[in-house]
Amino acid sequence: MMETIKAIIVDDEPNAKKALRGLLSENFEEVEIIADCSDVPEAVKTINKYKPDLVFLDIDMPGYSGFELLDFFDQQQIGFKIIFVTAYSEYSLKAFESSAVDYILKPVRLEHMRRALKKINFQTSNQIQYGVLRDNLSQQHDKKVVLQTAETIYVVNQEDIIFIQAEGSYTKIFTVTHGVLTLTKKLLDFEYLEIDGPFFRTHRSFIVNLNHIKKIDKKEFVLIMSNESQVHLSQDKKTALIERFSSRII
């Protein structure tokens, strides 16, 4: 007989909790949802009371984020595992993937839940997992790019780059903190950002930061960025771009 996994759901969205509970009850009889909570303080009380094996944990919640849950426990008190259920930006997914912590993107899909439950290791210390995740997230947010103009060298956080535009033999970097920087570089020199960051080549002349896109006009093939600039979207790039956002489309 399969051993029962006692679990709780922590999410401030009632519909998300209902959907997750339904998916689990219909497809994973080994998972018993014993309670659900709407924020971290309620989750702390519930964990202390019921001692669950597993916590399905949202990240963006009022008061405390899901990342702060384990801060309320001493290491010896942590007898549960965590699967983050998140609409968190792609910017931080590398941090999850390179730690031992499991995560599922919203809206939750059956195959993703199956993968996470299969992967989770109830023998490994969750405190270690969480520490690795927190370190990885910190490293993600500390990533910097060195940009040299004719007069100045700038050290810019990747997250502050809105988009990059080729203009003749120059490249313009549109940033949050330093405005527009003009470099004697080719756009090709910045393609590496797509490998390990939230960047996407939308057109032969543009690389954008996905986290700075405000709107996608699928008919006109134009992106509206956080600084209100319009960026061209090639027809052959539209499908790939939409797929990058598919996990967050409701």
Image (cartoon, grey):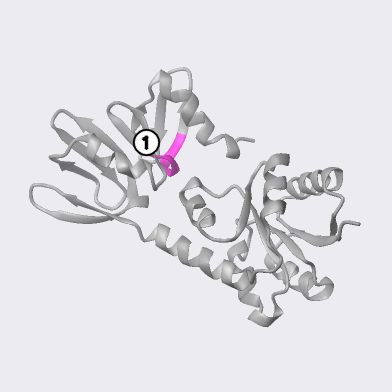
Classify mark 1: helix, strand or loop: loop
- Horizontally, residue 156 falls left or right of residue 11, namely left
- Pick the residue in front: 142 or 4: 4
Q: Position of residue 2 (x, y in %)?
A: 87, 56
Q: What residue did someone put label 1 on?
A: 228
- Horizontally, residue 40 falls left or right of residue 156, namely right
Q: Residue at x 72, y 53 (%)?
A: 117
Q: Quadrant of the C terminus?
A: top right
Residue 19 visible in the snapshot: yes
Residue 64 highlighted magenta (yes or no): no
| Crowd tier of the residue under label 1, counting other residues whose Cα lies within 10 Å: few below 14, some 14–19, many 20 or above | few
- The amino acid type found where label 1 is placed reads Glu
In the image, residue 124 sits, relative to residue 194, either above or below, namely below
Residue 65 visible in the snapshot: no
Range of residues picked out in magenta: 209-214
Direction left: furthest residue = 151
- Horizontally, residue 141 falls left or right of residue 117, namely left
Image quadrant assignment for residue 152: bottom left
- Pick the residue in front: 196 or 211: 196
- Horizontally, residue 143 falls left or right of residue 110, namely left
In the image, residue 92 sits, relative to residue 239, either above or below, namely below
Q: Residue at x 46, y 49 (%)?
A: 91
Q: Residue at x 53, y 60 (%)?
A: 99
Q: Position of residue 120 (x, y in %)?
A: 68, 58
